[in-house]
Amino acid sequence: YMSSKVFKDNVFPRHVSDLMNLMHMVVFSGTDGEEKWDTYLPFEQKECVALGLALYYQCDHCIEHHSKALCKIGKVEEDVLSKNMNSIILFLRTDTSRITSSEKTRWMQAWQEFSVKIAMNRDKATPYLIGLAIGMARDDDFLIRFCGGEVRKILGEQGIDTRAAIGELESIVIFMKAAASKNRIANKVEDLFSEK
């Protein structure tokens, strides 16, 4: 029995839905219900990254799911979470390959100032983890280098195995890409079978 209902509808094959629910457990909890693996990113960071990706992909189901998960942790109010996460995504939507070098320099300065202001519980890594995840999701060389370098520095200073942590982040990116792709179209696919 899968406790997570991430992919349930009347069209998606149940065995694939179960597989994706299992992947959700493995990615976010570090377990398949029987075996447990070492994790390097705390649950709260994973949920922040997932919410950032959900906002980036504009998947309402994923936004609702990951916002609830973060609010359940109880460390942030929903309106503050929404405001800060939307601001992060606005920053990260900038395609730095299309701006001048002085604009890019200012973007980096503004991002660094902003990321310190919104870091939850003095967690400097999370904004950069979100930036790196979005960089991975859209294959953005600049974001991967810029945010990835900061992630390696911040997590390295905390004694965290940065290669393992970034690998764990990759799994969130892959899961969220699949989840958002599925959940954004679920109603449209279901409509194919509705009587009109």
Image: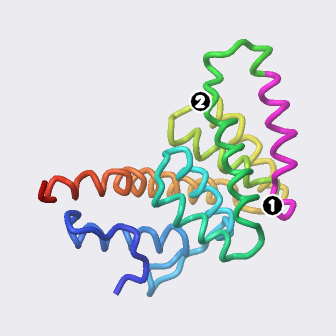
Q: Which mark is residue 63?
A: none
Tell me how far mark 2 sits from mark 1, CA to CA: 26 Å
Residue under numbered circle 2: 141
Q: Name the residue located 34 percent from the left edge and 55 percent from the top edge.
A: 182
Between residues 147 and 14, which one lies in front from this camera angle? 14
Q: Residue at x 86, y 48 (%)?
A: 116
Residue farthest front in this picture = 196
Q: Is residue 87 magenta?
A: no
Q: Amino acid at mark 2?
A: Asp
Percent across and percent down for residue 7 are: 35, 67
Does the magenta segment cover residue 107? yes
| Quadrant of the rendered image containing residue 75 | bottom right
Q: Nearer the viewer, residue 100 or 157?
A: 100
Residue drawn at x 51%, y 34% is: 139
Q: Total marks drawn?
A: 2
Which sits earlier in the primary sequence, circle 2 or circle 1? 1
**Residue at label 1?**
120
Quarter of the rendering containing residue 107:
top right
Where residue 146 sits, quadrant-wise, is: top right
Q: How is the image coloured?
A: rainbow
The residue range painted magenta reads: 105-122
Q: Nearer the viewer, residue 65 or 157?
A: 65
Which residue appears at 76% of the width and 67% of the height?
76
- Determine whether, in the image, residue 160 is placed left or right of residue 114: left
